[in-house]
Amino acid sequence: MSAAAEATLSRDEAFARIRLLRSPNIGPVSYTQLLRRFGTASAALEALPDLAGRGGAPYRPAAIDRVEREIASVRKAGARYLFHDGPDYPVLLAELESPPPILTVRGDVALLQRPSVAVVGARNASAAAVKLSRDFATALAGQGYAVISGLARGIDAAAHRGALAGMEHGGGTVGVIASGIDISYPPENAELQEQVACEGLLIAEMPPGTEPLARHFPHRNRIIAGLATGTLVVEAAPKSGSLITARLAAEAGREVMAIPGSPLDSRSHGCNQLIREGAILVQRPEDVVELLVGFTGQPRSSFREHAPDYDNPLDDDRADIAAMLTLAPVAVDELIRQSGASAGAVQMALLELELAGRLVRHAAGRVSLMS
Amino acid sequence: MSAAAEATLSRDEAFARIRLLRSPNIGPVSYTQLLRRFGTASAALEALPDLAGRGGAPYRPAAIDRVEREIASVRKAGARYLFHDGPDYPVLLAELESPPPILTVRGDVALLQRPSVAVVGARNASAAAVKLSRDFATALAGQGYAVISGLARGIDAAAHRGALAGMEHGGGTVGVIASGIDISYPPENAELQEQVACEGLLIAEMPPGTEPLARHFPHRNRIIAGLATGTLVVEAAPKSGSLITARLAAEAGREVMAIPGSPLDSRSHGCNQLIREGAILVQRPEDVVELLVGFTGQPRSSFREHAPDYDNPLDDDRADIAAMLTLAPVAVDELIRQSGASAGAVQMALLELELAGRLVRHAAGRVSLMS
């Protein structure tokens, strides 16, 4: 644990927080609800088996030796933990609804205090767009910005490389990865990831040892958008991950910018469409600076009318149990059967509702909504 | 004169109107004021020497034989006149403040009843933009639109060619030229201009025999913008004539659209800047149709905040005499000296003010503003 975290959290409580978040069916929402209800993660862990186990199989939190191994891996990777209420936790990320409760980081956390811009785009980008990404990042890092990206191929890698080449006035680059802090992906970016960790900052939400699975990327994108005052999409296909990052930025109330391209080049269509939908067209790094320097919390971009057409990343593993409930008591077994979700997932959803004061438990393992 | 014009105007009055507009120092504003004040052009021509000559050299309207030669030239070119209050005069153009009082046209005036879009851009356009201009025009003419442009090299010529290739459902193309109706410019577009006149419609504001001078082009651009529900800029350098057309369209309350391009191609900068300033980004002909079909007189484009950085084309030949006047009488000779304008120009400016009820004439050739 870091010196900063130790200053505010006891070693035991930090351990308990990590263990709580790694326990079965605990996500950012239930983690936060449990901390609020019980005051500390240690107290929550003590109460959890009793709370979650009612009417179902016994609940087992994450094993202590697994948590010990995780902490050893973080240390070995030269990384440290940031907790959502700690002094080094990035302020803009903390403004999100349900921010990641625990991050692992390697490198210079002072970059999290810099004005910040996310630069994202396609993996199979055109040579022109790769050049634009690099040039914009160099210029922005040279003006003291933290350039945030996802360490993917193409636009992301070019943004990191450009920022590393241009760092001045405290600017630099922040890489957010979908894997654990000790795993690099894709292989050809391993050296770049190491350089970002050494000269900039590397951030992972997943525990060390985690391979980057498809379902982790929306979470990574949300962190990228959440860390930045504005997100710049350099080149992107329609319906690509970069556009999801843009939507997440808009939903967080941040600026959304895009670099246009010729309609004859299909790789420009995503950015052009973003601009049609309200993103600000930028041609030069100065356009980005002008927009972000003047940012007052009220974006000039109006890109947010359209409902996102992707699953809410926070609901990934959680059945929508609340919608199945009424004021009439129903058996938990019935909920499990109807939802198709695992017994553990249903129990945790019910726990969240109970902690939120929205659930009543009745005899014979039945539940209903609070009237 | 056309059958339609003859139905509403006597041959003598039509002749008088043409003669009035070709008389020294008469522009659209004074022409309209004189018609309003005297009811007919014949009456205005009779009163003019007396009105304009006060305290200065005698005023001579355009020579009758010159007007006769003009009318013969128009006939010989296969053209006809349209008067601002005639049944064939284009409705959208008539909505402008001070529309051209007399046009000469060759071809199919029914095109002026079609939904209309102006397609304009650089003369030295990229091959990609020339292709876009042609493809958009073909698609729009195929959907029944009149595609309006200026018969210049590059984007304009491609728009006319594309529209000629795609005409369906009453769509076609309208060429507006800065010269007289019987002059073609540039030389390599002579054949295209003839084709536009034969298969579409050709429009000139200047009298036949007029060579296309630089100062005529803003007037031509204003007609292009004024004829169309929306103006599409395909590719344009910053501060180019196409951007002036876009501004004129915005000032007339019409839609302004632009096709984006890569910031790495400097020829895209004008269009990208237009979009930054509120023009609608369009990628496909369908984007244009969608915007124009829904046009209710309230543009979705917001491109109009910026003051135009060009001279008002209507004030070309006219000193701003009104601004020099106060409630205190001043000698007309003094106004001529201070303004640096010709005696005739000052006299006509004063006439306009007088006709507008804003001028008082005093003894000894002095004038003042009406209190």
Image: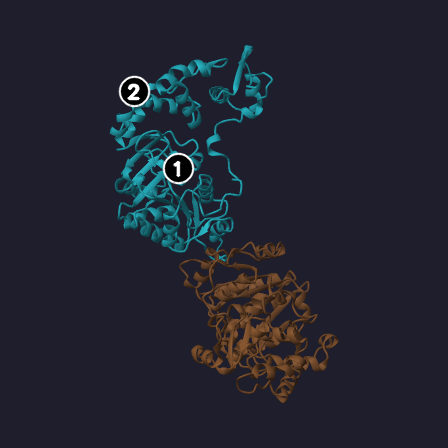
Chain colours: A cyan, B brown
- B314 and A178: which one is in front? B314
Q: Kindly report the distance in space between the C-alpha atoms of the residues bearing marks 1 and 2.
A: 27 Å
Q: Nearer the viewer, residue A51 or A270?
A: A51
- Quadrant of residue B156 in the image? bottom right
Across and down, in percent, residue B340 comes to: 44, 79
Percent across and percent down for residue A172 are 29, 45
Residue occupying the point 50% across, 35% down: A311
Which chain letter matches label 1? A
Q: Are marks 1 and 2 in contact (CB under 8 Å)?
A: no
Q: Is residue B130 left or right of residue B48?
A: left
Q: Tag 2 or tag 1, which sits nearer the N-term? A: 2
Image quadrant occupied by the C terminus of chain A: top right
Report how many numbered discs are placed on residues in the image: 2
For disc 1, the marked residue is A223
Q: Is residue A138 above or below residue B219?
A: above
Mark identifier at residue A12: 2
Would you say B111 lies left or right of A107 here? right
A323 lies above or below B184? above
Name the one closer to the observer, B261 or B346.
B346
Q: Secondary structure at mark 1?
A: helix
- Counting other residues with Cα less than 10 Å from the Cα at mark 2, is it few (<14), some (14-19), or many (20 or more)? few
Amino acid at circle 1: Ile
